[in-house]
Amino acid sequence: MFKRVLIANRGEIAVRIIRACREMGIESVAVYSDVDRKSLHVRKADYAYHIGPATASESYLNIEKILDAARRSQAEAIHPGYGFLSENAHFARACADAGFKFIGPSPESMNMMGSKTRARQNMKRAGVPFVPGSERGLELDAMERLAEQIGYPVMLKAAAGGGGKGMRLVTSPAELHSAYENARSEAQRSFGDNEVYIEKFIANPRHVEMQIFGDEHGNVVYLGERECSVQRRHQKVLEESPSPIVDDHMRRRMGEIAVRVGKAANYYNAGTVEFLVDQHRNFYFLEMNTRLQVEHPVTEFVTGLDLVHLQMKIASGEKLPFQQEDIKLRGHAIECRIYAEDPDNNYFPSPGLITRLISPSGPGVRRDSGMYEGWTVPIEYDPLLAKLVGYGEDREQAIHRLLRALYEYFVGGIKTNISLFRRILKDPEFQAGKIDTGFLDRLLTKPSNETDVRRPIIAAIGAAIFASTEPKATLPGETTTSAAANGNGGAPAPVSNWRRTARAEAVGER
């Protein structure tokens, strides 16, 4: 096993990996940019190395600076987390060339699955079902012919895409040209690759993914599915395991195909095979993510496995410590992604100083976080602050536990999307498991009890509290009733600044 591992990431995932290292007796090395000098992952790690300015291209995306920090710290392996360089085959190869073990799949597997068009071509050869469309990027005239053939609506997607970038829904021939140009332009800006392909748009699909794990000895297993249909702008905001729509038979078929995908790519370490599921419960291969997922905690809850521990063991050359028949799913887990963003301003990022933090706890609650009270959330990076997970014996108990935890959660000084998750979990359609990728858009068009009903009440309560605690103005020679009763003569009863600030923040944000 490794003695020292460098984490080429930041935020909550870096903290998560540092904790796993400590549990396994491995020393951890953090890297940080100028604005992350006081971040939680820097405080938690055994060693920390500065790697440059706030701009990601000059720090967290700079391969040479990451490798230089690994050399100086004498790390043996590098864990990329998710995002940044985690799916960069060039980085994985550079790690190996520099003598560091990359905790993830091989560069060859990443190359094969990193491009959606290459992945579709390889999956076709492996007999994996995927959504009808092109197997490579097309020029506009060829795309027009194929769109007529498979029928509108269609979806344009960046071959190197992710996170909803380079995607355009096209409902008619008149929209295709502008959508094509916009998708190519966004793909070039986001990924340095303007290849765009086309596929048939599936109305109201569910997004279900299968966690797989392989070792370097040819063994691959699946660890159950995650429902990821609650999305905003093609980005997941809430995930759960198991999926409300997947039964044992469907899970076995989906898992076997996911394993087939992994073996076709000679895959090892953690990976996720994503599927679209139509209204008739037919499922189609969408893409493969060649890294640890943001939502891995829900799989850890229902399988009882620690996926980061497992990543370390696989990377050190160990075999999988179990076989497929050993994997049993128990209970239900739901995860919310807590973002620094303003629900009242179109979810615009909300960086700034965290002046107050009250964290939830109790039975069945897990919080993976990269924030603390007194920390300033930077504007330069993804606004994900934490992940809050509720676990129960069944889906109903998981919902209730998570909802209780969300009402306990308070982050002062900035805006968060905590209120959004309270809306989601209380929605009858969600509670019934009737969700698809359009669910959240529909929910956001409904009036919100959280903002429309609670806010006037909270404001009234806050005004009353503030009025009762604020010293009253007095004329010269007069005394207030409370002052006289307390024997303070004409001096008003003091109210400390910290108490006044705390009340104002707590009442204003809850």
Image (spheres, rainbow, N blue to C red):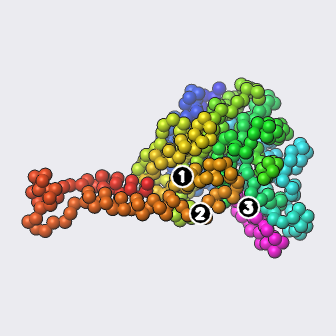
In the picture, which quadrant includes the N terminus?
Answer: top right
Q: Residue at x 17, y 58 (%)?
A: 492
Q: Name the residue nearer the viewer: 71 or 20.
A: 20
Foreground mark, 1 or 2, reads: 2
Identify the residue position indicated by label 3 in the image. 166
Mark before the other along the chain sequence, 2 or 3: 3
* Badge 3 amino acid: Gly
Q: Residue at x 53, y 58 (%)?
A: 341
The secondary structure type at the circle numbered 2 is loop
Q: From where the camera sits, is residue 322 visible?
A: yes
Callouts 1 and 2 close, C-beta under 8 Å: no
Query: What whole-number distance in Å separates the C-alpha atoms at marks 3 and 1?
Result: 31 Å
Q: Which mark is residue 459?
A: none
Q: Which mark is residue 422?
A: 1
Name the spot of residue 354 as percent of width and height, x first. 44, 52
**Which range is magenta?**
163-191
Q: Is residue 43 magenta?
A: no
Q: Is residue 463 left or right of residue 477?
A: right
Query: What whole-number distance in Å separates the C-alpha atoms at marks 1 and 2?
Result: 14 Å
Corner quadrant of residue 15: top right
Q: Name the residue nearer the viewer: 319 or 146.
A: 146
Q: Which mark is residue 446?
A: 2
Query: What whole-number distance in Å separates the C-alpha atoms at marks 2 and 3?
Result: 28 Å
